[in-house]
Image (cartoon, rainbow, N blue to C red):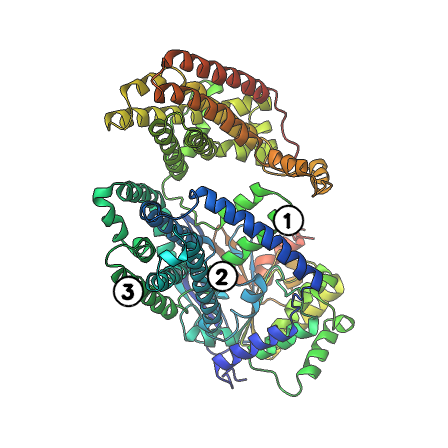
Amino acid sequence: MTYAARTDPSDRARAVRGFLRARRTRFRPTAYQIYATLVVGGISGALAGNAVSEAIGGSLTAHKLLVFGPVVLFLVLLAALRFGTWQGPVGFSSPDVGFLLTAPIAIAAFVRPKLDQSLLLGAAVGAAVAGVAILLTAGGPGSVGLGRALGAVASLTAFAVLAVAASWLVESSRRASGLVRRASPAVLVSAAALLAISAAPSVRALGVWSGPWGWAIAPLAGTSGWPVAVALTVVAAGASTILALRRAGAAGAEVFLARAETRSGLAASAFSLDYRAAALAYRSALPTRMGWQARVPRPRAPRLAVLWRDATGLLREPSRFGWATLFASAATVEALTHPGRAIPAGVAAVALYFAASFLCEPLRVDVDAPDTSALLLSWPFGRLLLAHCALPALALFAVTGITIVATVVAGAAGAGALALIPTVLAPIVVVAVLSAALSARRGGRVDEKLLGRLLSLDPNNPGGAAVLVLWLIPWLLATTIIVGGALLVIGTAVAHHRAVAPAGAVALGVAGTACAVLAGMARGSKRPDR
Amino acid sequence: MQGAPSLAVHDLTRRYGGFEALHDLELEVRPGECVAIVGQNGSGKTTAVRTIAGLLEPSAGRVEVAGAVVHTEPSGIEARAAMAVVPDSPALYPDLSVHEHLELVAIAHDVAGDDLDARIDALISKLDLADKRDARPGELSRGMRQKLQIACALIRPHHLLVLDEPVVGLDPASQQTLRDLLIEAKRAGVAVMLTTHQLEFARGVADRAVVLADGVVVADGPYDEIVGGAITAGLDSP
């Protein structure tokens, strides 16, 4: 029996792809579907364009481009790298892995066409973004000039290709994947530093020349030396593309099997509107690290059991604390440095809610398997839920308190900000934690009754969309209103040099009352039925 | 059962983070021999199969199929040509028929000849899938999908046949058919490695049993000697 291939493997790969193309069902839209897509796309596009235009204050000035452009592209590159750690630009379905990647054909022969496709798609998206940016430029496209416009298209296209190639380099290397995941918090801090540099006129040039994220902005912003920046971006994109193509055969079937399983898990969860299962599917795609098994001294008092369990969980998964710290300190700095402004206050409240959410994971685990906690702890569910809030509240209070002190010491906020620590800080933090816990209580699933109601909503009725939003993010909305409101009241007094004490008393009253109401709701929570 | 081993596994270790699912696995399967890997849930059977099949990278150690190393290119291509794998859960294209799945395997493995249709028809008749020739996976029961995966493995020549829990979902008649096919493969000199919970199924097919516990081989010897007692004592899965 011989196993020597009679035809060239790349010919065979082509034959397999041709066979699948010919046999597999293709989606052929009807005329109505095309019409509906064009109408919906046109309306959404106009709305999105309007929203973008509003967000950037009508047009893209050189100043805005120089301040925000580098950091936005820096974050886009980080997102592409993070995407590579669990999916990436090359993906295969589970049957593809079983049938194609186990065939006696070099895996690169199947990877290469998909990688080429992703690079082309990246280039098209980059060029489209460049086109939109030119249209939105202050003074209109005419003010940019042909040379700079071509430079902008070239540099943003090259940047997008660079992002796709970098994403594949991460996808194809386990070491690079681990590095990106571990370095992400530090990279986010670097993004904040980049923003600070770009905002300071004296060192702004550093932001533009700090890397491809800045070079790609240079032609549109009209920075002197922009042709050099374009050349640098193109060279960087070319080099990373060559490297990516050379590594087309670097990833084994395991990489694609894991991604295929994650994708099918995510699709199943999305289909049943179960975003907790989707989060777990995403998490299962990340490699586990069990090297260090931290231990916390066992408490003697049974009432401290949950606190002990949460502290142990936090020590064994320090990244949750890292992300919570990042969000909580960003929220604090945002609120302190923009007093009396509604949007920064709202953004700070949202960031604080997410920080609390990161710390509420042990509660979610108990909600996933409510029988476990019922057997191990014979506590009513409401008491369990409140007990799970203790550590997140203490941790967030410590982080936000330290950030307030650091902001004051750095001179970014007045010494009066220190008065927040013994007064309104605790109730504000507790509101965020209780809201996150009440949200986690639902287990991230839509129950059948609600699903029925959501499906029966009239799409023409704007109230339907409101119901959907209220279902999806009620506790985030509650935090935004309560915490954002309290911050706004105090911040307005500070910004207008009014007496802060009465405003603080109002904020304390609002947050304190909200705490009492939310704690009552938490205490009355029933164990979820699974 | 003479000659060089069709499957040679040396010091195979596989870790998931800090958890070691397989530890220093040593295994050889010779042409015409059938080895059954048995063990409880979580003992490392599926990890072993997936690593041998090249679907998982080993953390340490080496796997050779017909003398070709599985996890390096280009020898991995040779190894994949010599090995047919039946996974524990069927992953099939939802829009391809039974016949088209087999055609695809034949093209990918370069064994599509003028007699392909006849070979496909003979194989699916043997597996009692003839009346489902043009059916898609959505129209097949779990057992039928499993039989299709088995057919996909058997449609092409191979030195080594690896099956992960092949009888899950199969009715007693289909289990008997599979047993006959495996015996036929052994007679043709194919090395067979299978994992199973159903110890009775492997009786009469498997020559050797390798018992895994927590990723470590705890027993290795003649099948009846190692597993016979468990079957007699009624410890077999139904």
In screen coordinates, is A248 left or right of A462? left
Please give left or right for residue A15 compared with residue A405 in the image: right
Residue A271's label in the rendered image is 1
> How far is mark 2 from mark 1, CA to CA?
22 Å
In front: label 3 or label 2: 3
Viewer-nearest residue: B204 or B49: B49
Which badge, 1 or 3, comes first in the chain's sequence?
A: 3
Query: Which secondary structure, mark 3?
Result: helix
Of labels 3 and 2, earlier in sequence is: 3
Using the rendered image of the protein, determine whether residue B14 is visible from the camera's viewpoint: no
Q: Point out which mark residue B134 bears.
A: none
Between the C-alphas of marks 3 and 2, the distance is: 35 Å
The residue sitting at the bottom extreme is: B114
Residues tagged 3 and 2 counted as in contact (Cβ below 8 A): no
Q: Nearer the viewer, mark 1 or mark 3?
A: 3
Is the residue marked by circle 1 packed among few (<14), some (14-19), or many (20+) residues within 10 Å?
A: few
Above or below residue B85? Residue A435 is above
On whether disc 3 and disc 2 are found on a single subunit, the reply is yes
* Residue on which the image places disc 2: A256
The number of callouts visible is: 3
Per the rendering, the mark at residue A231 is 3
Q: Mark 1 lies on which chain?
A: A
